Amino acid sequence: MDDIVLSMKGISKSFPGVQALKSVDFDLKKGEVHALVGENGAGKSTLMKILSGLYRADEGEIWLKGKKVTTRGIKAMIDAGVSVIYQELNLIRQLSVAENIFIGREPMLPGGLIDWRKMYSDVRTLLKPFNIDINPRTKVYMLSPAYQQVVEIAKALSLKSDILVMDEPTAPLTGNEVDKLFEIIHNLKGNGVSIIYISHRLEEIPKVADRVTVLRDGEKILTKPLAELTNAEIIKHMVGRTLTEQYPKISIPIGEEVMRVEGLSKKGYCSNVSFSVRKGEIVGFTGLVGAGRTEIMQTIYGRMKKDAGRIYIDGKEVHIHGVRDAVRKGIGLIPEERKHQGLVLGLSVQDNATMTILDKESVFGFLKQKKLNALVGKMIEIMNIKTPSARQLVRYLSGGNQQKVILAKWFLRNCKVYIFDEPTRGIDVGAKVEIYKLMQNLAKEGAGVIMVSSELPEVLNMSDRIEVVFGGRIVKEFRRDEADSETVMEYALGLREKTGQQTPLVAGAES
C-alpha cells in the first residue's frame, strides 16, 4: 500500500433535496492516471470538490500520503499538493492570463514590486507545450473556452502539485490541442505525478488511464484496471443498462427552406458565409477551435453586429439588430457557455425555463402562473430533468440537467430555427442520446436545426448536411452520405484548399 498517495473513505455529501454522494471510497496510486466516470449527477465533481477543500463532506475521511487530513480548505489542499482543474473554470475573467496563473504567487523584485518580465516569461514557458500563441497580458474574458481551459491547466501545472485532478479537460479542445494535453499527462505521470481524470469522452480513457472507477447516483459501482474493461462495459455500469445505440439518427422528411444566410461577414470573425437550413433538417457545423463557428452563430443571433450579409426566414429577409430581434423572428440559441449565457444560476428551474415565454404568457403584466406551472411540469417529465421540484435552484443541478433546462426554455418558445452550440459538451453518454432524440423531435415537428460541434463522430452521425469552417469561412459542404472523418478533417485543417490570405481571427475569439 506504500504506492497509495490518496485515499478517500466513506465520503457522503447532501445538498437541498439531493443526496450527491453515499459512502464513496476512492484511492489513487503514485504516478497513475485514475479515470473517474459516471453520468451527469453521479457525484464525480462533488467528490473532487470535497478533495479540493471547496466542499466539506458530511461524513468520511481523506488520507494523503499515509496521513489523515485534518485541516480542510482550498489553500490547505493546495499546500498539501492537490490541484483541481474544474469543469466550470475557476478563472477571474477581468484579470490577465499571467495574473490568473500566478495570482497570490507573483514573482517579486526588491522593494516589493511585481517582476512582470519574469512572470510573462514563465507563462510563455508554461504554455509552450500547447503550441498555442496566447499573450500573457490578454484578459481572460477575451479568450475562447478552449484557451481558457489551457490557462487553467497551465495554472495547475505552475503549482507543481503531485496530485492533479482534471475534470473534463478536453471538453473545449480539439485535434492537436487534445494530443498535446495527452503528451503533458504522460510526461507528468512519468515524473511521478498522480492524476484523477474525469471525462465523458470514453474514447479518451484508453489513451490515458490505468484504472477506472464508475460512480452512479452518488455511489461507487466498481473500480477496476482499464485492461479488464471494455467501453461497452463501462457504459453499462454508468447508466445501469445496455446502451443499444449511441447515435439514434432517424429518417425525417426534409421540407422547404426555413432559413437562408447570404454573404454574412463580421470583420475579424467571419467572411462571406452562405448556407441554408430546411425544415426537418439537422445541419452540422464543424471545424477546429478558433475557426469561427461560434462567431457565425453569434452574428446570426444578433449578439454581434454583422458588417455585411442577409438573413432570410421563410423566404423573407429579416433585420436582426440584437438578440430580441432574433428571438422574435423565431431563432433560438442554446449557447456553448451555458453557465454565463444560457442560465441564471440563482433562479429556479421554472424561472429559467419560462424566460422566453413571459411575453406570451402574461395579461396586463400579470403572469398566467397556473399555465406556466403546467408547462414546466410537462417539460420536466418529457425531458427527464432530474430535479426534486420545479422550484429547485438551477445551480444545484448537474451539467446535463442544466443543459436540459436551457433546451426546455427554447422548446417552450417554439422557434423556427434552433442553433445548438456544443450541445453535448460535458454531458455523459446517456444524456447525449436524450439530447439527440430531443433535437430530432424538433426537426420532426418542422423546425430547422443547426448543430455546432467539436465532436466529429457526433457531426458525422447526426447531421443531414455538414458545413466545414476554416478561417472564418465555410470551405466545404458535405451531404451525410458523402462525408468521412478523414476528408472532413482535411478541410477543417485547411489542407484541401489553397486558402491564400485568410480572414484574420482576433486572438481569443470563440470557437
Image (cartoon, rainbow, N blue to C red):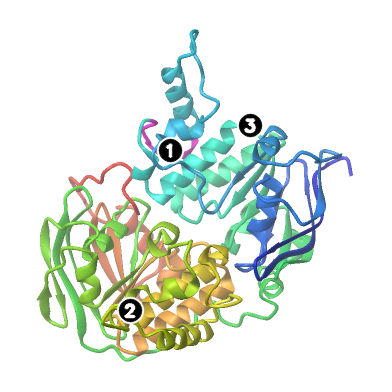
Which quarter of the figure has residue 458? bottom left
The residue lying at 21 percent from left, 82 percent from top is 258
Dominant secondary-structure state across the stretch colored magenta: loop
Question: SS at mark 1?
Answer: loop
In magenta stretch: residue 133: yes
Residue 294 locus on image (x, y percent): 31, 59
Foreground disc of the pair 3, 2: 2
Residue identifier under label 2: 357
Mark identifier at residue 160? 3
Which badge, 1 or 3, is on the more N-terminal residue? 1
1 relative position to 22: left or right = right
The reply to whether callout 2 and callout 1 are in contact (CB within 8 Å) is: no
The reply to whether callout 1 and callout 3 are in contact (CB within 8 Å) is: no
Three-letter code, disc 1: Asn
Question: Which stretch is magenta?
Answer: 129-136
Three-letter code, disc 3: Lys
Residue 208 locus on image (x, y percent): 64, 51
